């Protein structure tokens, strides 16, 4: 049996988003292999869901090539670019537990040259905190909202802000929170019109969606 | 085969709540029977989830004994009592579709002598509406919140009001709203502490819970 | 008991999207009421999920005020505006059964002055059909993809087009399709990065999301 | 990227319940940070779901500030107050496995100055045990019932006691018990009227709900 | 295409239970066919879940051969036998809505020559009713318990009675009752040891299980 | 807070089944306590789901009092009695993985004086194995069938054997087997009439059900 | 808005299976349109899930072009071809209720020139019926098994027959049968190796899968 | 209690597939036993889902008898045979994480003398990769497709290839991917006709299904 594998190097040129490797469930040697291939081809690369333990299990050569950011569980092959112009994305989180997901979003944006500002701990149980910041938040063309548990933040934001809002449900919570499905469904069934949603804990996907929105007036050829 | 049936006439004396018959799924002749029994025993009785069509299918004698309120899908055997003192319950609803459930709550309270005020259409997608009323609402010792879809109203209320808050999720919505389960779970997993919840569309149960709360300083012997 | 209801007339000024009334589950007299209020306030209004039968059950005066479009299950109070500039949204559907949802999307866009082009019957089981059109589709800044069953269309589009892609899962299908949840989850878990998703059959929501994207470079004050 | 976090210090003044930090899923340094902030602001604080292992991983300074209670998986910043007047809450548990949840309830009440009595091992499979105590239990204005598995305790209590009853389903059980969802649903669908329910294993939430009930005759301003 | 069908006439001789035809979902002409075959072969036959409307749609000859009992949604081909000895089964139901299922159980037992007594309306919300009868019920070697909603009756019975207890969950209830699955799971996860369970609304199956128990000391050859 | 706990010592006298302690999720010191209490009261006791590791963590005194059987994950306080008369229960298992559950069944029966014979590895994928034994199996008044995965064994047995059949679904399997729920549902929806079912992996419960059946002709007073 | 639709006429030439239109959920005028297009292009066409009522609602011209087979809920445009060689597929069904699905399979095969033989009523509750036919069934290169409820037929067949076995779960059953999902999962988790499965009630899909198998030695270019 | 176990040695002769032992959940000594039995009977044997750790825990004698392949989590007793003729199966995988499942498929085929070729990393997010290989893939009589997440690969393949296609959903993914159930359902509900499916991660089962297909023109006696 001979097996042939090829990363999708064309992705960036086709849709403007750099190839990323989802590391959860992959073995270290598989990751070593794709990083090596990438380096040899002079391609940039992001690695997501890379735990500290798995990072430590990579080959020494691989680790030399990568920049690892533990708080986001991410690594990069290639430089973080200069940010282009003003920060165009606001990242709003409901609680401290949603931090790792927010970090993944911020870094994915940065890797593509887009700056953002993060507004933390704005869960609606203390509504005054969100209301105090809403004037700033609504000036961003894209708002990424990160929340777990019942996800009420999504609806309140959606009713106050006219920008493009991308909801990222997180797996924070227990019991009926069902690993993030409750927050996911709250965003989908929100009474506020025009919210859009990505998969649970998918900070990377939300950043990619923001990139698509920001490019929406100048689409790929 | 001989079958013996007996309504729980002792319920009112035991826990202070009048027997109610849940009519969905029961046949008209079964309802006729229990109403007749009740009347003969000089007991009061509430009937819930009694559709217009099923009410019309009851025996003429039964209908003569009952007062039917279509907007709440309820009927009563016995008089509605004078209300005792000030209104002590606020009923807050998110949207128009939640009306029948709110009606059921109001009438169950009234049947037990407790007055309430209803504040409708306060869904959080238009947050200014709720904020404009919150000063009045928070003065009630018990607040019953009625909402479907993603149920974000529960969390916002819970963060602003210190009273006893009883969430009634409703089956309003579609797709991931799953017939009210989403709103139910949102209330249970709310980031606002101390919310309590009853079954989907259970306006009757919420009123009974309010009766228990109001009696909490003078418990049954 | 006195109940006060108020539509969210401020919504359009706050977030740029006109108030819409979801009619499924509402009684005709409730719809009559809100249309009358709207007309009296000189506000525009959209009505969604309004079946032919329920439309016919509205008061005659109400029907005189509305324009009803059966294929989209929608009605309007107020004129459809002139479209602004070029068509900026592509609506791509997988099959004929997804038509009513696509109609709802098209009309919601039109009501807000945005034109679109629809590309139907492009399900991936006959991939040549999609590949034949992809050159045109990718030039639109926003692509709304409408598909039921297993929703494979979302992933294929996401890999070929760099625009903002909004997935609308539909309830088309049977058995494991679970009323649209399968297509919903396929969009959320797609291997193509940056797809975003709205609730099942929510053509109205997808259009609102597109409006938010198109406004993303000129956000609300 | 700069991230700003702020605990909801206003919560106690707004709704009469002290801020609590849910520690499951948070990293030790995050907990250290909030405890330090709290101490600096002279605010009281509760920490829930804090395992022995995570407590041990906190900074030494943090541990010096806290009182840790392993059987309840809780810690406190600030003194436990004198209890006000008579015990006003009965905590009833079905079995030994529900103990940690009951402990969390008791301590949360105590932290807010409310005393309680606990009645353990009263599962309905040995009904005589519950019947032997019911005379005492029904004299409490609030009863918190803690049960897992099929949760039959909730219904039996609800039929015998007229007080305010708050059901806390626990994750005790296996197979169809589904991590506490069965007990949760049993409480919600109970044939006994007016039961209310909190999330699975949420002893903290049940205590907060009891605080709201006890305050119901003297609501917050 | 030629299709060959054959009822399992040998079933009675093999396991002591007469063949029954589940009529829900079958077309009238299919039922006519099997009744005709049965009659020609001089076999007895039971028909379950046969609605009044479907019975009326059977061929006139078929109806002549059958005895139809609407309250149990059943029909019989062949005589009901004399009952053998004392009544050996108690049927205990929680509420009026569970009646049709109880009827199906009673008639299936009767058709096999076994007598039973039914005790209705013994739901645990009014526990005194059940306790008042328990002395009689526990003398039956087999107890069939029929209950919907949260099914708390099963656990209470299981703790008080040492006989063989067969739980029949019913689809009575709404919201989280999930069409009977809640009652089903409550019986399975009961804290009372040794309860056994049949499918939702399966009164026929419970009767068959009772027949197997009663025959347990004299098994089939 | 003072907590009072009492095992249900009356259970054996009330329903003929000895008290058992489900050890999963209990802490060693809780188990030590109940064993000590039991010993002091001269009561017999069974402990189920007691892993080797947890057994080892019990106090030395406790372990001295108990007999531990690892293959069944059980321990006993008190002697195993002499078996009464012939073996009256057949235990039939589908595969090797179902062994621990079968062991739990066998020992529970033995502890109550009832003997059984076990027939292993009779899954229907190799049907000749079951057919070769069916002549012996059908002579037992009670058959306990233990199977995971798709649970087809239950239906085949049910069609061939007229005895009382108790199905024990096990958590053997993966993917759609859903931790035993598939086998559970297969038993409940079986086309063979009169099967009864206990919770997943509940070998103890199946033995208790068998005890109830065997006692069915001589019920408790 | 202009919408362009095109059936996948190339399907037959590409993968050897004729285009089929799934009619459930489509409006009569949509079906009229595609049949007309098909006829104009001289293409053959199958229509599945076409109820008698919807067939009757088609335009008269459409009905003139079609052959309708009510027992299979199918219609055809174009002649049924001569069958090629021996019957190569056995269709085995568990019960009478599975008939419509079996009919759909038979006709789809016939439309593609492949003959089959159907063996009905072979559910495993009466195992002798299946064993009596197994000698004939195992000689067919492809066996399509159709069963609902617990689907035990799939495993028994899979253990006795070495041919290619395609399981079609049906929605026959109630309660835990969950509309066919139980039978579906039973087939997937079967202890018999190498069974394959199609969607619930998908008789058409099973026939297509059989066509792929039969062509497996002479694949498409 | 005496327990008798017997592997199904007749399986190979009956249906042409060698007995395999699923090792997950089995204890090392149980595996030692069956390998010893097999060796003594001169039977070949496959062991699936055998982790490196469990392999290491087998008795030394057992390990001497086996060939272990870690990348496939499999072991073999007996020689791998010469492959018969041309490779007749194509194994197509969507991503690197699906590798272990593909390895299990390849080895199971090889153990039965059938060769295959594997095409990796062909997920549809980079569609050009699949399109570049499709000309070769479609020449194989059987194609086994291995994919997790949303499983869009199945539908695209199904529309392009006329061979027998067996879908193997894998547990790759997170959130709504639900451990492989999403990919499973995508394959079942695919818009491409005639796909068949095996259980999640069941590479062994897919290979067995391929063996049945390849033998379909020469069925077992």
Image (cartoon, coloured by chain):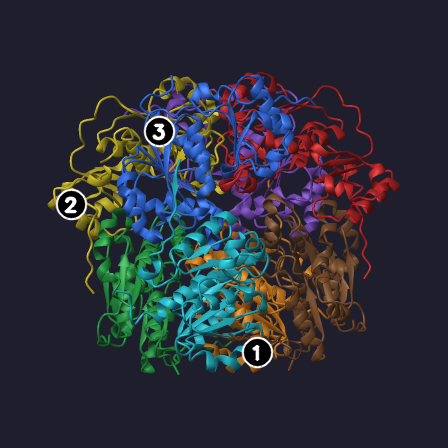
Chain colours: A cyan, B orange, C green, D brown, E purple, F red, G yellow, H blue
Tell me residue A63's x, y (percent).
52, 57
Cα separation, mark 2 vs mark 3, equals 33 Å
Q: Residues within 10 Å of mark 2 (few under 14, many from 20)?
A: some
Q: Is D27 situated left or right of A8 in this image?
A: right
Secondary structure under the numbered disc 3 in the rendered image: helix
Q: Which residue is mark 1?
A: B137
Q: Residues within 10 Å of mark 1 (few under 14, many from 20)?
A: many
**Viewer-proximal residue among G66 and G106:** G106
Apparent side of residue E76 relative to residue C202 in the rendered image (left or right): right
Extreme right residue here?
F40
User: What residue is shown with label 2?
Assistant: G38
- In this figure, which residue is indicated by the disc labeled 3? H213
Q: Residue at x 30, y 42 (%)?
A: H158
Residue B166: image location, x then y, percent: 59, 67
Relative height, residue A216 to residue F170 (above, below): below
Specify the quadrant that holds the C terminus of chain C. bottom left
């Amino acid at each position: 049996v001979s097996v042939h594998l090829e990363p999708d190097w064309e992705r960036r040129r086709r849709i403007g988003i750099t190839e990323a490797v989802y590391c959860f469930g992959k073995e270290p040697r598989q990751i070593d292999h794709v990083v090596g291939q990438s380096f040899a081809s002079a391609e940039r690369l992001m690695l997501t869901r890379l735990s500290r333990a798995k990072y430590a299990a990579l080959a020494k050569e691989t680790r030399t090539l990568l920049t690892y950011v533990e708080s986001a569980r991410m690594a990069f092959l290639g430089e973080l670019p200069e940010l282009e112009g003003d920060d165009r994305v606001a990242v709003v989180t409901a609680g401290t537990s949603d931090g790792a997901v927010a970090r993944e979003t911020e870094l994915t944006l940065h890797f593509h040259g887009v700056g953002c500002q993060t507004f933390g701990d704005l869960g609606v149980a203390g509504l005054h905190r969100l209301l105090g910041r809403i004037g700033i938040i609504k000036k961003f063309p894209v708002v990424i909202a990160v929340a777990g548990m019942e996800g009420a933040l999504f609806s309140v934001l959606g009713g106050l802000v006219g920008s493009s809002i991308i909801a990222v449900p997180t797996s924070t919570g227990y019991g009926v929170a069902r690993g993030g499905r409750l927050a996911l469904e709250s965003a989908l069934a929100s009474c506020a019109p025009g919210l859009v949603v990505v998969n649970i804990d998918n900070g990377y996907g939300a950043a990619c969606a923001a990139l698509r929105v920001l490019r929406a007036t100048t689409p790929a050829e």
